[in-house]
Image (cartoon, rainbow, N blue to C red):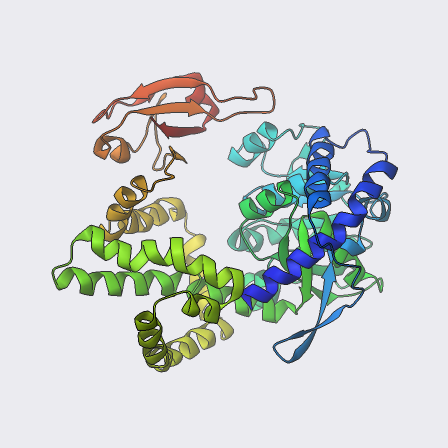
Amino acid sequence: MASLASRSATQALRAASRRAPRALSKVALKPAQTASYSLLAQAAAARCAQRSAVQGARGVKTLDFAGTKEVVYERSDWPLAKLQDYFKNDTLALIGYGSQGHGQGLNARDNGLNVIVGVRKNGESWRQAIEDGWVPGETLFSIEEAIDKGTIIMNLLSDAAQSQTWPVIAPLITKGKTLYFSHGFSVVFKEDTKVVPPSDVDVILVAPKGSGRTVRTLFKEGRGINSSVAVFQDVTGKAKEKAVALGVAIGSGYMYETTFEKEVYSDLYGERGVLMGAIQGLFLAQYQVLRKNGHTPSEAFNETVEEATQSLYPLIGQKGMDYMFNACSTTARRGALDWAPVFEKANLPIFEQLYESVRNGTETRKSLEFNGRATYREDLAKELDVIDNQEIWRAGKTVRSLRPDYKPEHCDLLSRKPLNDTFEWDTKMVQQAPLQFHAFRFPTASRGVSEPCHIFGPGDDRALKNSEAIQEDRLHLVCT
């Protein structure tokens, strides 16, 4: 499925490449449209034009996925001029500016659509939105103001926040507006979330298959993420068309149809399974057995994680599991073929148990309870800190630093604790590092480059006090 998705996305990009130069020459960009889109689109078009063996327009919407016919929608169906014309009378009100809000909002804005953002005034998301060029009173508003001004309400708050804010938001979703989600969680599990959409509005879903950061990165590269689209309620008769167009607007390369229920079931199941939960569990189990039998941390990590992520998994993504098997030694192939059914048999009951836990709402209730706590962020930080301190991942930091192509890493500092006018940062990483770290301010719209504001030496655990960068509440470190 992964290789097929890759091929389909590539075909969509190739088809779009023929249209890109024509679209760029014909479309007059709106005054509000940022110059970044023009540059990004021109760069993407130039790259596409250089590609050889460009395929002709396929024009087929029903494809064979391993013997099952499925409908897909491609970006090439919506060239920029058509997209802008379709939404010329709409205002996309982006509610929430987290991972998905950031990626989808910037992409839609760069595509020339009229986009505004609604978040809590003067909070972290408000400050981040300003850094990204959203202007208070023009394109940045409170949640209530944004919903009032918008025609398409894109509810991209976290699942817990959607439930908590629904009593305030619901009365503002008036007849004629469109309610948009990127996850079916709140609507499907309405008994727990209390989110029941009004009966007189279109309710649609576009769910990118990746983080908001990936949505943004692939768009800037001229590619596009794959997404699923669904319609929960079609009042106008145009809900599906609108969903597909919005999918293109926020950066999708191609989209496949699903339902709200299937989207949320597969998403929660996958995250707890091989995408995140299961893979962490399998990595730990294999690593622990190797260490128990006398293997060093570096050897155990390399044979468990490094070879998988850097050598083998990319091959699966390119052309599938059989391609990866054939790229390995005869001994490796024989062992993998023998043991794969053993792991399948052992894990199948666990995955069946997991799917049922998702379907019956158990996972939803756990998520809402945890993410609704007043101490949610502190509790999460503690759990993630446990993972960060596991030997396998501490060994991994050293292994990564030894890669031939290793470059200094940018990373956010976690565990900030406000103490009067002083902000103490978690400097564990600095204390353990043999190298020097420089703290930089994140670039903003008015400042195109990062600026140094403090230098950590080895073992330096000083607090950073009252610097301009701290006031901005955003730092990253660069290892030098």
Looking at the image, residue 95 lies above or below residue 203: above
Q: Position of residue 194 (x, y in %)?
A: 59, 62
Q: The C terminus appears in which quarter of the rendering?
A: top left
Residue occupying the point 46% across, 75% down: 355
Q: In the rendered image, is residue 420 in sight?
A: no
Q: Position of residue 351 (x, y in %)?
A: 41, 75
In this rendering, does residue 381 appear at all? yes
The residue lying furthest to the left in this view is 294
438 with respect to 193 (left or right): left
* Residue that appears at 32% across and 78% down: 339
Q: Residue at x 75, y 48 (%)?
A: 17
Left or right of 31 in this view: 53: left
Residue 178 screen position, x and y as percent? 76, 54
Decide which of 285, 374 is in the foreground and name it.
285
Total marks in image: 0
Image quadrant in which the N terminus is located: bottom right
| Horizontal side, residue 352 vs residue 128: left or right | left
